[in-house]
Amino acid sequence: MLKPIRSVAVGAAAAVLLVSAFTLSSASAATEDSGRRGGKGHSAAPQTLGTLGQKAGLRIGTAVNATALAEDAPYRAKVAGEFSSVTAENAMKWEAVEPQRGTYDWAAADELVDFAKKNRQLVRGHTLVWHSQLPAWLNNGDFTAEELREILHQHITDQVTHFKGKIWQWDVVNEAFNEDGTLRDSIWLRKLGPGYIADAFRWAHEADPRARLFINDYNIEGVNAKSTALHELVTGLREQRVPVHGVGIQGHLGVQYSAPHDIADNMLRFDRLGLETAITEADVRIPMPADSTELEAQAEGYGVLLRGCLLTPGCNDFTVWGFTDTYSWVPDTFPGQGAANIFDADYAPKPAYSTLRQTLALAAGRH
């Protein structure tokens, strides 16, 4: 099961945040339900995650399924009402925006950006350079290194230029590392060498100098070989004046594994470099069927991630990777697992939702 986060040297107020967060339980959900009914002494309209996050100095976001946004009214309403930032789950990935070389389809991504503007939400762009979800013409093409470099340059320039002024943070390079801290053997590394990472950031910055540029990866929540290698990489890039502004820590957890109890220690390493940080893809999967104990363990996992962010001055966004189990990516990717989100398939809040609300409210009161 998930373990409590370790205390870190972040001062008395932060220690109170850590200790108080562990007092949260399913009883808080009952209190919130009473508040929704408008009973005496309760607000008839509880504050949303986005509103509570704003008071705590943090954007609270969700990844957005483009089909659900277009076709599912309750989903659309929840995205609009609950969150203060959004991420395109798939609509900005290369295979979606450039299915044929030189032919772009921005429709789904544009719809999300327009939706966010109407609802006063900021947009995280995801993602410009990744080894996965590439279009067939690119995966199957026989390109020289020079040709591939120009293709990458053109893609980054075209995509960032299309959304110029509309994207708050870009995940420029996604999942570039192996678990042992070596660089992933991707099409980009094989053909272009490790310099492709610096090039990608430079090209993105040229296309939109105001966007904040992130490197994003999974299993870097705690201090380990992978997060240390990433720390060394961004240290070097910053020394070379490469415009890397932030590190995205995905936050895909499972209740059957230990929680990243050293997440605050790890995130503060990047903070000391002057980098922004964000939890970019939080979810906590459960071996199915889920029972009440596992749902409480899930709530703890979400709480560990959020507290790590709140204890890091440069952490400015906490994004859940989808908020309802209806559209979760987990069952297809991890057979036999699921229930990873903060709302169930009927949009009913889980203990994890209550934990996020209560933790944000506590942080807001001390902000």
Image: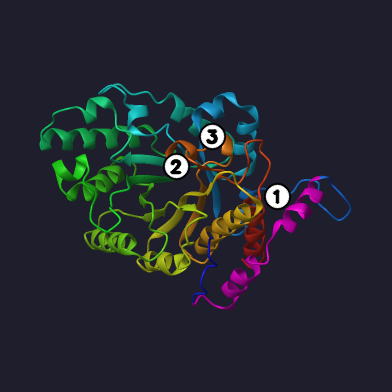
Q: Secondary structure at mark 1?
A: loop
Residue position for label 1:
47
Residue type pointed to by label 1: Gln
Tell me which numbered mark, 1 or 3, is placed earlier along the sequence.
1
Residue type pointed to by label 3: Tyr
Task: Identify the main secondary structure in magenta.
Answer: helix
Q: Residue at x 31, y 24 (%)?
A: 99
Q: Splitting the image into 4 quarters, where does residue 98 fall?
A: top left
Q: Residue at x 77, y 53 (%)?
A: 30
Q: Residues within 10 Å of mark 3 (few under 14, many from 20)?
A: some
Residue 13 position in % (x across, y down): 60, 74
Residue position for label 3:
327
Residue 342 position in % (x across, y down): 60, 46
Q: In the depicted view, which residue is nearer to us: 174 or 339? A: 339
Residue position for label 2:
334
Q: In the depicted view, which residue is nearer to us: 277 or 7? A: 7
Residue 355 position in % (x across, y down): 64, 57
Task: Name the mark nearer the viewer: 1 or 2.
Answer: 2
Q: Determine the CA span between mark 1 and mark 3.
A: 24 Å
Q: Residues within 10 Å of mark 1 (few under 14, many from 20)?
A: some
Residue type pointed to by label 2: Phe
Task: Name the mark nearer the viewer: 2 or 3.
Answer: 2
Q: Splitting the image into 4 quarters, where does residue 182 fall?
A: bottom left
Judge left or right: residue 341 versus residue 129. Answer: right
Q: Residue at x 13, y 33 (%)?
A: 147
